[in-house]
Image (spheres, grey):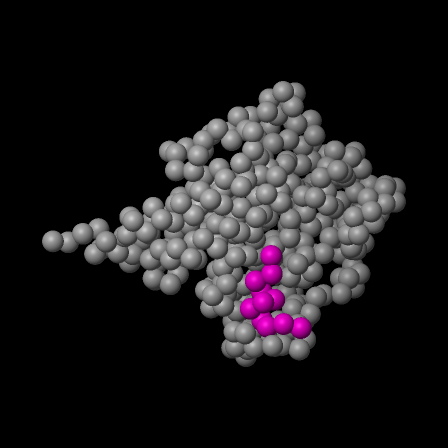
Amino acid sequence: MTTYKDAGVDIDAANTGLKKVKKHAKTTFNKHTLSDIGSFGGCFSFPKQDYKNPVLVSSVDGVGTKLLLANLADKHDTIGQCLVNHCVNDILVIGAKPMFFLDYFAAGKLDINILDNVIKGFSIACKENNCVLIGGETAEMPGFYDNKKYDVSGTIVGVVEKDKMLSNNKVSKGDILVGLPSNGLHTNGYSLARKVLLDKYKIGEYVKDLGCSVDEELLKIHKSYLKVLNDILEEPWLKALSHITGGGLIENTHRVLEKDQDINIDWNSWEWPNIFKLIQNEGNIEFNDMIRPFNLGIGMVLIINKDSLDKLENHLNKLNEKYYLIGEVI
């Protein structure tokens, strides 16, 4: 007699995993959470009294081949944080603040410990960003994924007042670009980084130029900029934000410009973190092939009225947040 478990799907293991998911997710619940994990749908009571004309803003993303590094290093507790923070930053560009997040976890064979670590990461980042981990899907897919491989994606939903959407603002020529530092690669450029670095360095091998191993560096958590920007999102001098992901500084910043505008970036206005120097040197990579896949040390770009730079500087200095004046709109 053949069972579902014989085919590679262990429902009992999935139920055990669900208990761990519930434990972590419940730490993120707030007064607006109306459903428990395991329901057919996540229910959230929208705080309509706090808004006049609310707009819901959603985004979905993954972490790409950063997952392969997590597998090689057998370190899975940062992946969930990276994904949540990435999604938070994407809707932050619109001016939205997160309300709830849903995850998707799929594997060839469900490993409860890996699932537990990934979901724990989701919950940590959700709490840090005042966001509810309201639901998700865990799928065991033998034959589709290798037994040791898994994939994750996440969907976030946030809200912003319609008249406060940053996309309403018009960027002007002469506005300046202020860059906020990244925490390494974040979640982009990993295919190139792996090709260059893993041919030379072993997992766990200390690299002097990095002050740690390659896998420790590459598994650093994608930074959320919500706390840094939360108090200035509605300032009239903040024209636009650009989350620097795949496509790099140029392509991502162009997404918030007018059609007749361009940017002039001073590439010498900040120093590349050592990880990017190492990738370029070890791979003998041309400059133009570095600026598209990597953030090069700038994770978020603020476009502001140049006459308001002192206001932004005062805000960032109070938070001890580093920043760089990296260019202007032309």
Q: Position of residue 212 (x, y in %)?
A: 63, 72
Check the image and report above or below for 141 versus 33: below
Q: Position of residue 150 (x, y in %)?
A: 41, 57
Q: Nearer the viewer, residue 72 or 28?
A: 28
Residue at left offset 55%, top offset 40%:
28
Question: Where does the magenta region start and end?
Answer: 211-221
Residue at left offset 52%, top offset 69%:
194
Please tell me whether residue 150 belongs to the stretch shown in magenta: no
Residue at left offset 56%, top offset 51%:
81
Q: Position of residue 109 (x, y in %)?
A: 33, 57
Question: So how many labels did they put on this image?
Answer: 0
> In this rendering, does residue 128 appear at all?
yes
Residue at left offset 59%, top offset 43%:
127
> In this rendering, does residue 58 appear at all?
no
Q: Nearer the viewer, residue 133 or 107?
A: 133
Quadrant of residue 49 within the rendered picture = top right
Q: Position of residue 68 (x, y in %)?
A: 47, 64
Quadrant of residue 188 within the rendered picture = bottom right
Q: Nearer the viewer, residue 72 or 56?
A: 72
Quadrant of residue 266 within the rendered picture = bottom right
